[in-house]
Amino acid sequence: MAPRIISDAEYEHLHATRKRLLDLPRGRIIDVQTPPAAALTLASAEGEPEQVRDAVLAFLKAVNELCDGVLRKQGRANLSAVQAAEDGFAFLSDALELGGEDSATYLRATRDARAAARQLDVAGVEAAIRARAAARAAKDFETADRLQRELVAQGIVLHDHAQGTDWTLPI
């Protein structure tokens, strides 16, 4: 359960951001050591809870901006920036006890709990996603688009990436 310094939605955002960082293509991280952006340097948790919360959210925003830059066409990131972000997540886990568990596992469990609450069949959703991928590969875009519309109509958000498609259920 998420500690109360941040909301459950913010805790989920923390895990989604951490997973994005971990999933960055390593070939786009260049071995350059320069001082990282100040927002990526999260080294203290001082002040009132609201100040700490604001610092955590600013850090997550900076990490997402870093990930966005890497994922753009021809995007790259300095190793020092990625290491600063990783250090920030270690700090969150160690000092604030935020996000210490495996992010992919946490996000999947959260999604599956929401699916169960909405009486969605996880295996059926994943089968439809695989069918959509097969239709796209076969250039049957009419079927792929229909499957996507059906999934979206159920409240499912699809996240396409080079390794396939992930899906989430918003709160």
Image (spheres, helix red, strand yellow):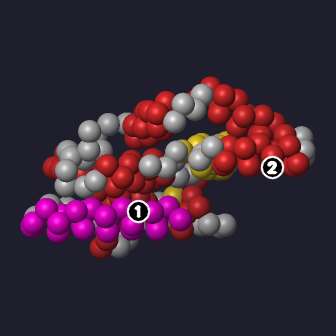
Residue occupied by mark 1:
63
Front disc: 1 or 2: 2
Mark positioned earlier in the residue sequence (1 or 2):
1
Identify which residue is drawn at 66% across, 28% down: 124
Query: In terms of secondary structure, what is the magenta stretch mainly?
Result: helix
Looking at numbered disc 1 in the image, what kind of residue is underneath it?
Val
Q: SS of the residue at dot 2?
A: helix
Q: Is residue 37 above or below residue 95?
A: below
Left or right: where 77 falls relative to 99 = right
* Residue 92 visible in the displayed image: yes
Q: Residue at x 19, y 50 (%)?
A: 4
- Amino acid type at circle 2 is Asp
Q: Is residue 67 magenta?
A: yes
Residue under label 2, please give it.
145
Q: Which mark is residue 104?
A: none
Q: Which residues are magenta?
A: 47-68
- Residue 127 part of the magenta segment: no
Q: Label 2: how many residues lie within 10 Å, few (<14), some (14-19) or many (20+)?
A: some
In this picture, is 165 found above or below 113?
Answer: below
Q: CA distance from mark 1 to mark 2?
A: 32 Å
| In contact (CB < 8 Å): disc 1 and disc 2 | no
